[in-house]
Amino acid sequence: MPRSPVVPPLARPLARPLVLAHRGARTVAPENTLEAFSTALDQGAAGVELDVHRAADDGLVVHHDAEALGLGILAERSLVEIREARPDIPTLGEVLDVCRGSLVNVEIKNLPTDADYDAADRVAEHVVELLDARDRRDDVLVSSFNLATVDRVRALEPSIPTGFLSMLDPFEGIALCAERGHGSLHPFFALLGQDTAVPIVTRAREVDVAINVWTVNDEEEMVRLAAAGVAAIITDVPDVALRVLSAG
């Protein structure tokens, strides 16, 4: 018998979708940096999306790829080494501090094709440990392309909202989320076609799954997906999305 999903705020019907800044306001400031995140929030974004990897000493750092210029594979370097060589790479805790009061979509990078892939999902464990240590005062949604990873987060702490990033058919993704108790599906926006977007959102709402689409930078697509009823739009241009959606 599957457990009921933890439904994040994104699952509630909205007058317009929330705008989440993909890696921060990355067209204005370097992506996945404190500056990019604070800029996005200053622009009015409801929250941010970021990528997290583990360091060799189990620290958590925010960076898109498993490897970083001047360091190589992050999981093979200690947090001190990372900070000394690349002070621009923040820790997850630092980002949560900067984004306090806003939603933070933490994407855990842990696919078998990643240079730091860990079948034991230690990074999921460390994310949960960090949130525990912070007394759950952060508004977070933990997601991953690796279904086993978000399953692990949910098994460790069912109260943390989780989402499945997917290139699957959205109806299949919705079914998986409902079965495994994940409150949101994050499909690539193009998977919600002209004729399928509304039925997909309708089906998702029937099983209390939020649809948060990525990465939406085209203004017409923003309008189309908002009209279909998606819960959130993840975008590189939060300022543009806010302008477009406010005019709608």
Image: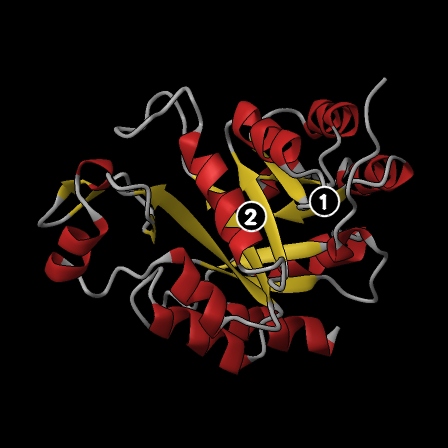
Q: Please provide percent x and percent y for residue 16.
A: 77, 65
Element at label 1: loop
Q: Which residue is mark 1?
A: 159
Q: Which mark is residue 214?
A: 2
The answer for how far apart the CA atoms under marks 1 and 2 are is: 24 Å
Amino acid at the residue labelled 2:
Trp
Q: Residue at x 29, y 66 (%)?
A: 30
Q: Nearer the viewer, residue 23 or 61?
A: 61
* Rendered-image quadrant of the C terminus: bottom right
Q: Please provide percent x and percent y for residue 73.
A: 19, 37
Q: Please provide percent x and percent y for residue 2.
A: 82, 22
Amino acid at the residue labelled 1:
Ser
How many neighbours does mark 2 have within 10 angstroms: few (below 14), some (14-19), or many (20 or more)? Answer: some
Q: Does residue 149 appear to the left or right of 242 in the view shown?
A: left
Q: Does residue 48 appear to the left or right of 248 in the view shown?
A: left
Q: Which mark is residue 206?
A: none
Asked if 50 appears above or below 239 in the picture, the reply is above
The answer to whether residue 216 is seen in the rendering is no
Asked if 113 appears above or below 88 in the picture, the reply is above
Q: Nearer the viewer, residue 51 or 135?
A: 135
How many neighbours does mark 1 have within 10 angstroms: few (below 14), some (14-19), or many (20 or more)? Answer: some
Q: Nearer the viewer, mark 1 or mark 2?
A: 1
Check the image and name the residue furthest to the right.
Answer: 206
* Rendered-image quadrant of the N terminus: top right
Asked if 58 appears above or below 100 in the picture, the reply is above
The answer to whether residue 182 is seen in the rendering is yes
Q: Earlier in the sequence, mark 1 or mark 2?
A: 1
Q: Residue at x 84, y 33 (%)?
A: 4
